[in-house]
Every structure is written in structure tokens, then in C-alpha cells.
Image (cartoon, helix red, strand yellow):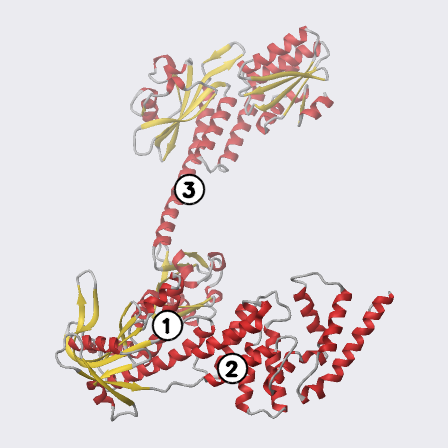
């Protein structure tokens, strides 16, 4: 065998040193203990020519070790063994803490490994045994042998490096664990907390703080606090002062404005200190007061803002303990709501009630009423409790009147939208009541009770739709104070009262039909209901007809009041397209008659309106001047510059139902224009000649197409 | 087939042995047994795919040297590919790469041997 192939001692030493260097270099790159241990074991076996190896590690909080890594061996025979620190080879190394040979055959643990020779080195943490590195059976070409003395030093050196790396990973794990724990605590608390470092950069922030600040964590972390709180100079001043003077500062009820959100907070800023008590930044705690605001807001759902403010200013005014006092009670309820709701879906019922209550409650608070309760479709309102005012009764009557007046407008919208109007009856009484928190321990509400309350409820029952019924007590309090007008009604006998009760109906202004409001509501209805695919009979056409009606009517010297009617007919003339395009004039007339009747539109004028709508049916057949105006307005575009734009819109709409060729469309237009005539002097003078020109252009286009020379 | 020898195949007249695990005395002897048997049948080119071998010891290396010596007598060759860095380093230190070739991939090894 040539010498060149002999592996000499020098090469082996070189390999050992290189391996040790590798281990030293690589150990700190591992961040997981199992991976680290496996790598150490494999390299130890390789460099020491061991046939196999094991690493045992101590269990947390016990004296027992477990197999943490194994190499090139069957460990099934070791399973079930309890590697106690006080027994066998582990006991010995536990005491000496030095690498050593072990007589495998006599050891209670290693004798199960089916090996002969073992070399063991301790893994230590602050001189305490935390594990053992075991290599088994040194290999040679002659078979296995005992490890050399030089191997002891080598394994010791590897074990020492391994211990350092192992302890580092354990330390990092415990730091991570502590950090995770702290983070979890921080993330769980409802107080918003963030810290800044000495550079003023935000280096920690919890979830509550990002919520309060309405900013994502990524947009806050690493940024200087002055940048983050650009719009909140007070916070910047607090942190700066805290940094400079190392003092804790706080501010109450501060309105924080971040990223478009305003939140009322209490804020405190404290210096952040290290172990040496040296400042390393600041810690800022923010308490979100929104919940308190919500409480206040909830309170305001039942009591007007003015009452809330009065109570907040002077808590002594608030006597919730139960007392007898004078108060005015208003009851209202919707007439026939039960039968009305039977024809509505549950969603519609809720929407209707919400719309109605929102409107009513706004009025109640305007006059400082306290919304005691909502009972189905009925409202109970107190004036004079919890805080009594001179004007309580007057305010109750004003509330009732405004409720009825606003309802007229509210109903106008409902009627135009083909919904049944809401009619209410109102009853008001004044007298002694017992006020306070009344109820069970589980549920207690502030309310008033007593005979006077019951009577107010009875008066409400007596009131017909649109009526406001007040007791004589109420009337006596308000009759001289304001210019209320009342009508004496027949005394009524109510349940619980032996004598009939004198009552009065309060008169209020019932506005006549309001044209401008009606126009706006009809326009809104058209916008939301006209089929969007209609490119001609759209809201733009309706608006154009309304505009042209007004223009032509003025030129034709029509009275202002009639112009309003013509415009109303114009708004309604194509509304039938929503339901029946083929007979839209008739359907529109039916709709107009129905809603105008409900809206108290003068009956004598309803036929005028429906007549104008019907007159627009092609061929147009106006029977009076007003009908002529709407007919001319409807086809005003025939003599206008925007003819093509309008006719293209009509063509697209026709194409929704049938195919139409270019020549057919030109012929239709030609025929239509020939048959059409303007009726009013204004339109004849202003549009007729342009219409004739348009007709000639179309006829020329027809000839060109027939001759095969194209449209132009 | 043992746990250590994962597969033995032939390609372009080269015997390719795929190993798995510790190349120590036992592993080395398993490789040499295959090589010597193939040499007895007139095959003198060997490649060892060591993708599954993450560690070698000097005994395993010395057995490979023994195989190289036998191959030199019959003008044969042996090469290795898919070596872990630590194995490459050990082969270099032990002088093995002076008498045999380490390749990156199988295709390169088959063409280059």
C-alpha cells in the first residue's frame, strides 16, 4: 500500500480542530434546541469515530433526564427507562461534572444500549448539570475500542461549547416567553399603552392604543411621537416635558384627534426607567372615555340635551328616589297601526316605526320633554320630571302641535311613495304624579305613575286621528299664556272616573298642499323608481318637460297658480312608466288621483292634472290651453338643437323591445315629425321652423340611403 | 439492501451507489462489499450518491481509501456527488479528494468520471 494513502495523526488532529471550530462557529446560529443538539451529537460522533451517540437533557423541574437526541442507534431498548440524576453514570457525572469513560456493562442505563464503550461529557448551566453528551464505541478498522484519553478532552471541549449554545437558546426562549407574556398582558388590557425610546420613537404599542388612535401598528411603530401626534400638540408637550423633567404628567377629558377619528381620553405620561433608574424613554397610558360618552348618549335618548346638561351641572336636581310632584304627561299613538302593519313586512313595520319615532322624538326633545317609554306604536312623554320648569304644560302642547304638523309633511313623502300615511291621536293631562325609579331589583326605570298619568292615556284613546285632546287642567294653564286655540268637545266618561271629564281639542295649522315639497318628493320618487334602462323616459326628460312647461306657460301669460299645476302634471306625466309603460298616461293619472286626494290637493283641480297627463298620449290631443302647454313641452326637443341626442335616447329605449333598422328608424321619425304640430303660439314661433329643417334632413338621409350613397 | 445502502444502479457503465446515514466502519464496509463484488464482475467505475449521508468518520474515509487503492490497481475510478459541506470538508482534510473526484450533481458526475 503506498504511503500516500495512509491517514496520519496530523490529519486526524486537523480534522478534530476543524470540527471543533465548525461547532463553535455554527452553534450560535441555531435557535432551536433539538436542532442544536442533533448537530452537536452528529459531529461529535463523526470526529471521535464513535459508532453512535445520545444526548440526555433534564426535564424542567425534575431530576430526571430524557433522550433529546440520538444518532445511529436503536433507542427502542431505552424507552421506558427513567434517567435519574441520582443513578448510574449520571449520578457520577452529576457529582464530578467532568467528561469520563463509563463501563457500559455495569451501568444500569447504558447496559441496555448493546454497546461496549462509552465516553460521556456533562452539559452545564452555571455549574449545574443540565444534560449529558454520550458517544458510544470508538471505531477502528480492527473493530470497536475504548475511546482515547485525547477523545476525553475533545468531547469536553465540544460539550463546553454546546453548553454555552444550549444556555443561550434557553435564555432567548425565556426572554421570548417573558416578552410574549408581557405582550399578551399589554394587548389584553383596555387601557391604551405605548412607549417611546430616548430618540422619541414609539417602540411598543398595545392593541387598545392603536384602536384609540385609529392607526395601524405599522404606521405608529418606529415613528417619532411628534410626527404621530402632529394634530395633538398637547400630547407632544406632555411627552416632551416628561422627557426633560422626568415627571409624571396627566390630562383629563382630552379630545384626541387621530386619522379622522375624535376620541375623548384621559392621558398620563410617565418616565420609563431602566434597572439603574436611568430614563430610557416614556410610557404613555390612554383611557378611552367613549363608553362614558355612550352612556351620556344613551341618557340623551330619553332626555333632552338641555335636561342632561342641567342634571350634570347640578346633581341635586336629580331626585330619583320617589317623590310626589306636578307633571304634564303626553301620550300619542298611531291610529289603525295594527291593521296597517298586517299588510306590511316585518322590516317595513320596523322601518316605518323608526322613521316615525325619530321624527317625533326630535320634537319631544326640542321642547325638553322626557321620553318615558315607547309602548308599541305609542309614546309616553313627561314634561316636569325629573326637572320641573315653568313652561312644562305649554311645551307639552307645543310638542303635540308640532308632532301633528310635522306628520303632515312626513305623510306627504309616504303617500307619494305609495305608503299609507300615519295618523296619530294625542292626549295631554297635568296633575300630581309619583316619580322615581320604579320596577324590580332586576330592572328599574325612572318613570311617573298615578291617576294623572292614567287620565292622559285615556285622553289619547279618546283623540281621533289628527286630534290633540287636552284636559281642562292643561287648557287652564295655557289658554292665557299663548295664542293657542281650542274647540270644546263633549265631556267624556273615561274608565276609572265617575264624573265625565271636560276636554278640549287644540287647533293647529294644517298647511294646504305644498307644491314645492311635492315636486321634490315626486322627483325623488322618480329617481329611485324609473327603470334605469329607459334612456329617453328618464328623470332628465321629466325635468326638461317641467322646465319647458314653466317657460311656455309664462310666455303664454298663464297665471302663477296654474303654472304650479302644469308643473305638477309635468312631474307626473311619465310616472306611469314605473308600472305600465304601455299605458303609462292612464296609470300615471290613476297614481296622481290617488296621491293628490291623500295629500289634500283641491279636488276640483285633480281632473285638471289628470287631463294634462292624458293629453300627452300620442297622438297628442289637448283640450285646453294648459294641456297644449304640456303637450308642446313634452315634444319641445323636436325643434331643438339637441334633437339627435334625444332621438338617440328614444331609439335605444325602443331597441329594448325590438330590433329596428336605420332606414326604419328614419322613416318613423319622418312620419312622426310630419304628423306632429305645436299648439301654443310660443312653441310654433320658437320651434316649428327648426322642426321643419330637421324633417328635411331626415328625408334627405332616407333618399341617400335608398340611393346607396349613405346618410350624409 | 441494508438501511445504509439505499440503492445500487448502473448507468453508462458506471455503478451508482446511493447511501443513507452515517458513513462509518459499518457503512464503509457495506460500500466496499458492493464495489469489490462489482469489480470481480469487471466493473471499475463507481459513483457514490451521498445525499442521505450527513456525516462521515475517519474509519469510513479510510475504507473509501482502501477502495481507491484497489481501483488504482485495475485502472478504475470512484467519485462522489451530493455531498454535505461537512462531508466535503472531511474528504478534503483526509486527502481523499486527491485521488478521487467530488461532483456537484449526478449528471455532472456521470459525464465527468
| First in residue order: circle 3 vs circle 1 | 3
Q: Residue at x 44, y 79 (%)?
A: A597
Q: Which residue is mark 1?
A: A356
Q: Which mark is residue B62?
A: none
Residue A712 visible from this viewpoint: no
- Choose top left, top right, bottom left or bottom right for residue A103: top left
| First in residue order: circle 2 vs circle 1 | 1
Residue A145 visible from this viewpoint: yes
Mark in the foreground, 2 or 3: 2
Expressed as whole percent of the image width and height from the top left, the position of residue A567 reads: 56, 83
User: Where is the N terminus of chain A found, in terms of image quarters?
Assistant: top right
Identify the residue at the far left of this view: A498
Q: Nearer the viewer, residue B108 or A293?
A: A293
Q: Which residue is mark 2?
A: A607
Mark in the foreground, 3 or 1: 1
On screen, residue A580 versus residue A229, left or right, reads: right
Look at the numbered disc 2 and give the secondary structure of its residue: helix
**Rounded to the nearest whole Å, what is the CA distance between mark 2 and mark 3?**
91 Å
Q: Nearer the viewer, residue A447 or A176?
A: A447
Q: Nearer the viewer, residue B80 or A264?
A: A264
Amino acid at each position: 500500500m503506498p504511503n500516500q494513502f495512509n491517514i496520519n495523526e496530523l490529519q486526524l488532529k486537523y480534522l478534530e480542530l476543524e470540527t471543533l471550530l465548525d461547532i463553535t462557529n455554527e452553534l450560535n446560529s441555531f435557535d432551536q434546541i433539538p436542532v442544536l443538539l442533533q448537530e452537536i451529537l452528529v459531529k461529535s460522533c463523526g470526529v471521535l469515530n464513535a459508532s453512535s451517540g445520545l444526548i440526555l437533557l433534564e426535564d424542567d423541574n425534575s431530576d430526571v433526564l430524557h433522550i433529546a437526541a440520538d444518532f445511529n442507534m436503536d433507542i427502542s431498548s431505552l424507552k421506558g427507562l427513567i434517567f435519574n440524576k441520582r443513578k448510574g453514570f449520571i449520578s457520577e457525572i452529576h457529582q464530578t461534572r467532568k467528561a469520563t469513560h463509563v463501563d457500559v456493562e455495569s451501568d444500569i442505563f447504558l447496559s441496555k444500549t448493546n454497546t461496549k464503550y462509552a465516553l460521556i461529557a456533562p452539559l452545564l448551566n452555571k455549574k449545574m448539570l443540565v444534560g449529558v453528551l454520550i458517544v458510544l464505541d470508538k471505531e477502528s478498522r480492527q473493530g470497536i475500542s475504548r475511546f482515547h484519553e485525547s477523545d476525553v478532552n475533545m468531547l469536553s471541549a465540544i460539550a463546553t461549547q454546546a453548553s454555552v449554545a444550549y444556555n443561550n437558546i434557553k435564555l432567548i426562549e425565556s426572554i421570548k416567553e417573558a416578552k410574549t407574556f408581557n405582550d399578551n398582558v399589554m394587548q389584553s388590557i383596555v387601557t391604551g399603552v405605548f412607549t417611546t425610546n430616548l430618540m422619541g420613537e414609539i417602540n411598543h404599542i398595545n392593541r387598545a392604543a392603536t384602536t384609540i388612535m385609529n392607526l395601524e401598528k405599522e404606521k405608529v411603530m418606529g415613528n417619532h411621537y411628534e410626527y404621530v401626534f402632529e394634530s395633538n400638540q398637547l400630547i407632544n408637550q406632555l411627552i416632551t416635558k416628561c422627557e426633560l423633567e422626568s415627571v409624571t404628567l396627566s390630562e383629563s377629558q382630552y379630545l384626541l384627534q387621530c386619522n379622522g377619528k375624535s376620541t375623548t381620553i384621559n392621558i398620563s405620561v410617565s418616565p420609563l426607567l431602566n434597572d439603574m433608574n436611568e430614563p430610557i424613554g416614556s410610557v404613555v397610558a390612554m383611557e378611552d372615555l367613549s363608553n362614558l360618552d355612550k352612556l351620556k348618549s344613551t341618557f340623551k335618548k330619553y332626555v333632552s340635551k338641555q335636561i342632561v346638561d342641567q342634571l350634570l351641572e347640578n346633581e341635586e336636581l336629580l331626585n330619583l328616589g320617589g317623590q310626589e310632584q306636578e307633571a304634564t304627561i303626553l301620550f300619542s299613538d298611531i291610529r289603525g297601526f295594527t291593521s296597517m302593519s298586517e299588510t306590511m313586512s316585518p322590516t317595513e313595520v320596523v322601518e316605518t316605526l323608526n322613521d316615525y319615532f325619530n321624527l317625533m322624538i326630535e320634537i319631544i326633545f326640542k321642547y325638553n320633554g322626557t321620553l318615558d317609554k315607547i309602548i308599541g306604536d305609542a309614546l309616553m312623554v313627561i314634561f316636569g320630571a325629573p326637572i320641573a320648569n315653568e313652561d312644562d304644560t305649554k311645551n307639552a302642547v307645543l310638542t303635540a302641535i308640532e308632532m301633528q304638523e310635522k306628520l303632515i309633511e312626513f305623510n306627504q313623502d309616504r303617500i307619494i311613495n305609495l305608503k299609507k300615511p300615519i295618523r296619530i291621536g294625542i292626549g295631554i293631562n297635568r296633575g300630581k304624579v309619583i316619580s322615581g325609579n320604579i320596577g324590580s331589583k332586576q330592572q328599574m326605570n325612572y318613570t311617573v305613575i298615578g291617576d294623572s298619568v292614567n287620565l292622559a292615556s285615556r285622553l289619547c284613546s279618546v283623540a281621533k286621528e289628527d286630534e290633540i285632546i287636552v284636559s281642562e287642567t292643561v287648557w287652564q294653564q295655557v289658554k292665557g299664556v299663548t295664542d293657542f286655540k281650542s274647540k270644546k268637545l263633549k265631556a267624556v266618561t273615561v274608565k276609572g272616573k265617575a264624573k265625565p271629564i271636560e276636554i278640549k281639542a287644540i287647533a293647529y295649522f294644517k298647511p294646504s298642499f305644498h307644491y314645492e315639497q311635492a315636486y321634490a318628493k315626486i322627483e325623488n320618487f322618480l329617481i329611485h323608481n324609473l327603470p334605469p334602462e329607459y334612456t329617453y323616459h328618464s328623470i332628465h326628460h321629466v325635468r326638461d318637460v317641467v322646465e319647458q312647461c314653466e317657460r311656455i306657460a309664462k310666455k303664454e301669460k298663464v297665471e302663477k297658480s296654474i303654472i304650479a299645476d302644469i308643473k305638477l302634471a309635468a312631474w307626473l306625466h311619465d310616472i306611469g312608466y314605473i308600472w305600465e309603460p304601455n299605458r303609462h298616461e292612464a296609470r300615471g293619472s290613476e297614481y296622481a288621483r290617488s296621491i293628490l286626494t291623500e295629500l289634500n290637493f283641491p279636488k276640483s283641480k285633480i281632473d285638471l292634472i289628470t287631463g294634462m297627463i292624458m293629453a300627452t298620449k300620442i297622438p297628442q290631443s289637448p283640450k285646453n290651453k294648459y294641456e297644449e302647454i304640456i303637450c308642446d313641452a313634452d315634444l319641445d326637443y323636436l325643434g331643438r338643437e339637441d334633437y339627435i341626442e334625444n332621438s338617440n335616447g328614444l331609439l335605444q329605449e325602443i331597441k329594448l323591445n325590438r330590433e329596428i333598422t336605420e332606414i326604419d328608424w328614419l322613416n318613423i321619425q319622418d312620419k312622426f315629425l310630419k304628423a306632429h304640430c305645436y299648439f301654443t303660439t310660443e312653441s310654433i314661433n320658437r320651434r316649428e321652423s327648426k322642426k321643419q329643417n330637421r324633417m328635411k334632413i331626415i328625408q334627405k338621409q332616407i333618399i341617400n340611403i335608398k340611393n346607396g350613397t349613405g346618410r350624409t | 439492501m441494508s438501511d445504509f445502502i439505499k440503492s445500487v444502479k448502473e448507468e453508462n457503465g458506471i455503478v451508482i451507489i446511493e447511501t443513507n446515514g452515517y458513513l462509518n466502519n459499518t457503512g464503509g464496509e457495506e460500500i466496499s462489499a458492493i464495489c469489490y463484488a462489482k469489480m470481480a464482475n469487471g466493473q471499475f467505475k463507481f459513483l457514490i450518491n451521498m445525499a442521505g449521508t450527513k456525516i462521515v468518520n475517519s474509519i469510513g474515509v479510510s475504507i473509501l481509501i482502501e477502495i481507491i487503492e484497489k481501483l488504482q490497481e485495475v485502472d478504475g475510478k470512484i467519485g462522489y456527488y451530493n455531498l454535505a459541506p461537512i462531508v466535503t470538508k472531511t474528504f478534503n482534510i483526509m486527502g481523499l479528494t486527491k485521488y478521487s473526484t467530488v461532483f456537484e450533481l449526478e449528471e455532472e458526475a456521470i459525464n465527468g468520471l
